[in-house]
């Protein structure tokens, strides 16, 4: 009987591959799924970049109640004394700071949130104009809520996600529209995002943005990496199967 069993196993060597195949398939499915997810992210990011390019191509307009996100806008008014807060957290050199958020009071229009640029939480020579100012930049929409972001501290006027309604209420301007004018340094606009030139040195603060954000788009490389790993996994498994089938029973 034992001889017949061994002969049966020798006549059907592929049975030795059934269990390893079931173990290898989930890994292959995972790698292919990650590659497909990156392809979806690639299409999404291409849409985001196209929308940013279309917004940047619009002519500058006066800040209204509902501008196109990231479109160039301008505003004239006076900064409200003491109505300031900080958005985000960034270390520059040895100074800890964030984006200075201010309230701009406008004649005949609701107040406007203004992202003036980076400034330290303490110290530094921060400019606070007392007279009328003319600002130019882009319309910064609200951030998507991130459950993993640090909790805001409205009492201390420290915010870690851009929620215009929440920030405006904390700064005493609940009637401000649900966006902000992010100031761009005039005359020195350069592409933002990954690989952008550093902000020019300035004697005074805050240090405004040097361009409209342009996020990088690495998802094609990520997709090729995952699909390449899937292809390598298949090649390794086939080589193992070939060697396994050549082994004596």
Image (tube, helix red, strand yellow):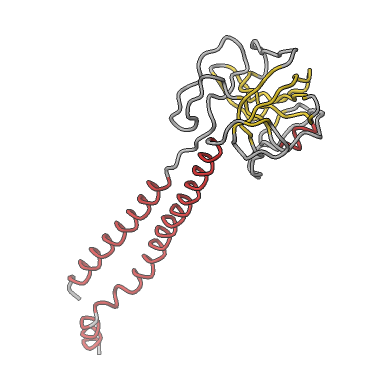
The part of the image, by quadrant, that contains residue 3 is bottom left
Classify the position of the C terminus by image quarter.
bottom left
Task: Work out which quarter of the rendered image holds the N terminus and state it.
Answer: bottom left
192 versus 241 height, above or below? above
Residue 14 in picture, x, y percent from top left: 26, 77
Q: Position of residue 24 (x, y in %)?
A: 36, 65
| Residue under the image location 50 percent in, 48 percent down | 47
Q: Position of residue 180 (x, y in %)?
A: 68, 32
Image vertical order of residue 62 relative to residue 248, above or below: above
Residue 149 is situated, as x and y percent measured from the top left of the image, at 64, 39
What residue is at 49 percent from the left and 44 percent from the top?
50
Indicate the quadrant where residue 156 lies: top right
Q: Nearer the viewer, residue 99 or 246?
A: 99
Query: Measuring 56% from the left and 20% from the top, which residue is drawn there?
Result: 186
Indicate left or right for 213 with 104 as reference. left
Asked if residue 165 lies left or right of residue 188, the reply is right
Foreground residue among 230 and 128: 128
């Amino acid at each position: 009987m034992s001889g017949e069993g061994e002969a049966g196993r020798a006549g059907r060597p592929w049975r030795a591959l059934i269990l390893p195949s079931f173990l290898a398939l989930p890994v292959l499915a995972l790698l292919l799924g990650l590659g497909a997810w990156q392809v979806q992210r690639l299409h999404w990011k291409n849409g985001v970049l196209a929308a940013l390019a279309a917004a940047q191509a619009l002519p500058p307009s006066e800040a209204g109640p509902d501008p196109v996100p990231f479109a160039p806008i301008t505003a004239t008014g006076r900064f409200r004394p003491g109505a300031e807060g900080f958005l985000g957290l960034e270390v520059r050199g040895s100074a800890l700071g964030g984006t200075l958020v201010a309230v701009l009071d406008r004649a005949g229009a609701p107040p406007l949130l203004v992202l003036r640029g980076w400034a330290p939480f303490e110290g530094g020579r921060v400019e606070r104009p007392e007279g009328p100012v003319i600002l130019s930049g882009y319309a910064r929409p609200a951030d998507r809520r991130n459950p993993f972001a640090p909790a805001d501290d409205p009492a201390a006027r420290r915010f870690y996600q851009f929620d215009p309604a929440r920030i405006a209420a904390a700064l005493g301007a609940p009637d401000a529209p649900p966006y902000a004018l992010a100031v761009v340094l005039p005359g020195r606009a350069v592409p933002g995002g990954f690989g952008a030139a550093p902000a020019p040195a300035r004697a005074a603060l805050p240090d405004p943005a040097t361009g409209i954000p342009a996020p990088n788009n690495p998802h094609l490389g990520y997709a090729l990496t995952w699909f390449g790993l899937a292809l390598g996994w298949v090649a390794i498994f086939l080589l193992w199967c070939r060697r396994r089938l050549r082994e004596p029973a």
